[in-house]
Image (cartoon, rainbow, N blue to C red):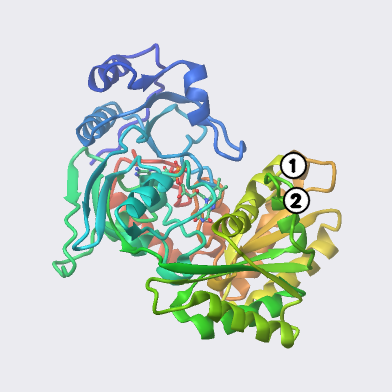
Amino acid sequence: MEKPQNKQVGPESSGLVEALHAILGQGGLLTSPEDRAPYERDWRGLVKNPACAVALPKTTQQVAEIVKLCAANGVSIVPQGGNTGLVAGAVPIAGPPQLIICLNRMNRIKTIDLATNYITAEAGLTLSELQHAAAEAGRFFPVSLGAEGSARIGGLISTNAGGMQVLSYGSMRAQVLGLEVVLADGRIWDGLAACPKDNTGYDLKQIFIGAEGTLGIITAACLRLYPAIAARASALVGVDSPEAALRLFQAARAAAGSGLTLCEYMEGDSLALGAAHVAGGALPFIAPGYLLLEVSAPDSAHAPGATLESVLAQALEQSVATDAVIAQSERERLHFIALREAISEGELAEGGAVKHDISVPLGKIPAMVAAVRTLVAEKYPDCRPNIFGHVGDGNLHINIRPPKGQSIADLAPRKTDITADIEALAVSMGGSFSAEHGIGQLRLAGMAAHKSPVALDLMRAVKHALDPANLLNPGKTIPGAV
Ligand code: FAD
């Protein structure tokens, strides 16, 4: 198949815009610079490139027609959900204007099946709306993250998002039972049927999960639901080192098993940053580091409070923990979570950071933190590490903040080196340079540096098979795929 040349298409210039209007109807196409602006800029404000327009389809059929039109005109497409991704995957690259297809108006719930425990919904439903729908049906949807009010099902699946409860329930991939996808040639693949057992050839849905919109546009998904949580107990615990945090995690895991549904580590400075950006955010005590622990039970036969109390009593007695507060109400439990979730927004509000999202084998967490501290002290002594994350998954966000009073722009000359150093440290310890945020436009150097040539060849082969004209999200995920 011959590769069409991307054309310079401006909103005013072509029959394409008229044809898009005809497909999308009133209010379905944004063309003015002011209307397009919020869709063209990533959440962190690091990347902003123009799109020729923003399409807001309401049906899968409309998405398919738009894709066919773009394919015929050689116009590239950037799929977008809530635009909360942290690697600039949902905004255009520099170059010929691309069409953003934002699925946020496709936000209907199609079915909830309580016998099989699944929900089928369109790709534009937010994660919060999904969680509420599950709760109203007496079920639980476990993926939970700081951007859940804005992040959409299609984006979450396309980044294989993780969040705070991967520990017990797995990431987004583990929740997906079926998908509906518009392919690069405009055909619709209906793989929504949630048949519990199906070994009929390749498991095609897996190809689109974590593909960051480079292989197809997800228009609907069938997702797993779980029994509602009957009881949960949460505690904010002080620890004086990453070693102690790891020991406490292991003790809690041994006591609670898969009932340990949350284990987040935050260094002292990091949680203080969150606390400064939450209403009523005073910390209950000051410690060098904190663990946020939650033990949950699906039925009344278990007593998560007793399990947590016994773990904490032992940890305090053995000086693994320095202090601990157990949430006395649902309000206090949610407040602990809000403190943790506010770290990213607090960081952004106070000058931003060079962000990293690494994982290492669990036992290497203390060595990784120590290596980062040594690196920063020796090579970037004026910078301030902000270290927090999903420690039970070996996943830490190791963000490097600029010197006090400066902003991320001031770190620009050193940004590439800082990132290369931290990514190399994680990979040298047997870890990953991008644990849950994906690659987008911002992690391509890491892909080129750390992914094997064989892995990159396989990825290029898959991309070529599904999107030979490189229509979908060019310049993302695979180095050189522009
Ligand atoms: P977008 O940002 O719109 O898109 C993300 C990628 O998916 C892009 O490549 C886009 O092209 C593609 N895409 C979007 N929709 C579709 C579709 N329908 N079909 C095909 N491709 C599509 N992430 C975590 O994993 N864990 C966390 O704990 C976490 N915490 C966060 C906290 C904050 C405060 C913020 C701002 C972000 C956080 N994130 C986290 C990152 C982000 O929320 C997730 O990556 C989320 O999955 C993005 O969803 P979205 O709808 O905003 O996707």
Q: Position of residue 361 (x, y in %)?
A: 56, 77
Q: Quadrant of the N terminus?
A: top left
Give the quarter of the image for residue 288. Answer: bottom right
- Asked if residue 67 can be seen in this view, the reply is yes
The amino acid type of the residue labelled 1 equals Gly
User: Which residue is identified by label 2?
Assistant: 401
Left-right relation of 100 to 38? left
Asked if the residue at label 1 sits under 8 Å from ligand 1, the reply is: no
Helix, strand or loop at label 2? It is: strand
Mark 1 vs mark 2, CA separation in Å: 8 Å
Q: Position of residue 437 (x, y in %)?
A: 51, 54
Query: Which one is earlier in the sequence, the residue at label 1 or at label 2?
Result: 1
Q: Position of residue 265 (x, y in %)?
A: 64, 67
- Asked if residue 262 can be seen in this view, the reply is no
User: Which residue is identified by label 1?
Assistant: 351
**CA neighbours of label 1 inside 10 A, class few (<14), some (14 to 19), many (20+):** some
Q: Looking at this view, is 164 or 368 the one in front? A: 164
Asked if the residue at label 2 sits under 8 Å from ligand 1, the reply is: no
Left-right relation of 264 to 120? right
